[in-house]
Amino acid sequence: MSNFDELKREALLAIQGAESVVRLRDVEVKYLGRSGRLTEVLRGLKDVPENERKEKGKEANALREVLEREIAKCQSQLQDADHERKLAAEKIDITRPGKKHHKGSLHPLTVIRRDIEQIFGTMGFTVAEGPEVETEFYNFDALNIPADHPARDMWDTFWIKGKKLKTEGKKLLLRTHTSPVQVRYMQTHTPPFRIIAPGRVFRYEATDASHEIQFYQLEGLMVGRDISLAHFKQVMQTFLGTLFGKDMNVRLRPSYFPFVEPGAEVDMSCVQCGGRGCSVCKQTGWVEIAGAGMVHPHVFASAGLNPKDWQGFAFGFGIDRVAMMKYKIPDIRMFYQNDVRFLKQF
Ligand SMILES: [Zn+2]
């Protein structure tokens, strides 16, 4: 008898002391489980003298019921408490001020690239693309810059170590300009056509306010039976005038690029002073904006076109540089620093 009282007292203490549903379950197993304390007692009844067995059995069963009831009660209390805690933790005060979410904006280089594409689009130019990892062939050879040509030094190149392209046996590099797209496009299309090819280019050089190791360039190409530099000047004037929202003058100065003949540096009237002369244009009224020229016969030939049948102009300029002039950004590196204070102005 006293054994049952002792067991009951102990079990009830354990039940009430359980501080979580999991602990309570442990207590249940300890007393009522398959090898629990009370279960053992019930199992031992077969060894009890017959005259006591019935009485003891009754008592044991009664205790079992008490414990089961107590456990059920305790469990429901613990679950209620859990529920309350959860509710308190998840409570939402709808009168509190909301969180402000920062809204993203387009990168200035994306904004200007889209503007540029749109303007050239109105003049019938479509957008062409090429790979950023190029072969030596497309980046140099096909553009009339063979391996031993001193002009190769004009482009400081990131070479890609140990890689050769099976089909051409040429070294790979990060393209130093978007001009390879010209060749790729001419290989797969028949003139007349007019394209622009905006894209990222890479130069292995020290960075400063006007140089980055990567930047964006835009290549342009217009080929037909009788396309001349006069067409180019008109296209450029229309483009710049629309982009800057004012009349722009364009002038060409003779220059040298291996893939054009004749070649020219392209100046536009200074946006800052409108051509009167200021510190930005070093009092000249002109700002250098692009390189251009008539497509070299060797380039036509390497693209599989007969230079006797076709002629056209090609040009290239830095998208970053145009954006710097349009938005008056003093340092090209700002485009690539991901400073939100800078980026959110666009
Ligand atoms: Zn000026």
Image (cartoon, helix red, strand yellow):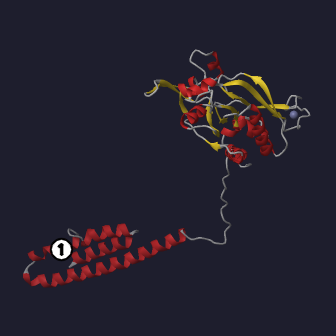
Q: Nearer the viewer, residue 48 or 181?
A: 181
What residue do we see at 90% from left, 32% from top?
277
What residue do we see at 72% from left, 25% from top?
263
The quadrant in which residue 251 appears is top right
The quadrant in which residue 103 appears is bottom right
Judge: label 1 CB < 8 Å from ligand 1.
no
- Residue 324 appears anywhere in the view: no
User: For the residue marked with disc 1, what is the amino acid?
Assistant: Val
Q: Where is residue 199 in the image (x, y as percent from the top left)?
A: 62, 38
The quadrant in which residue 92 appears is bottom right
Q: Where is residue 304 in the image (x, y as percent from the top left)?
A: 55, 29
Left/right placement of residue 166 relative to residue 109 reads left
- Residue 233 appears anywhere in the view: yes
**SS category of the residue bearing label 1:** helix
Ligand 1 quadrant? top right
Left/right placement of residue 219 relative to residue 240 reads left
Q: Position of residue 162 (x, y in %)?
A: 46, 24
Mark 1 — residue? 41
Q: Nearer the viewer, residue 107 or 16?
A: 107
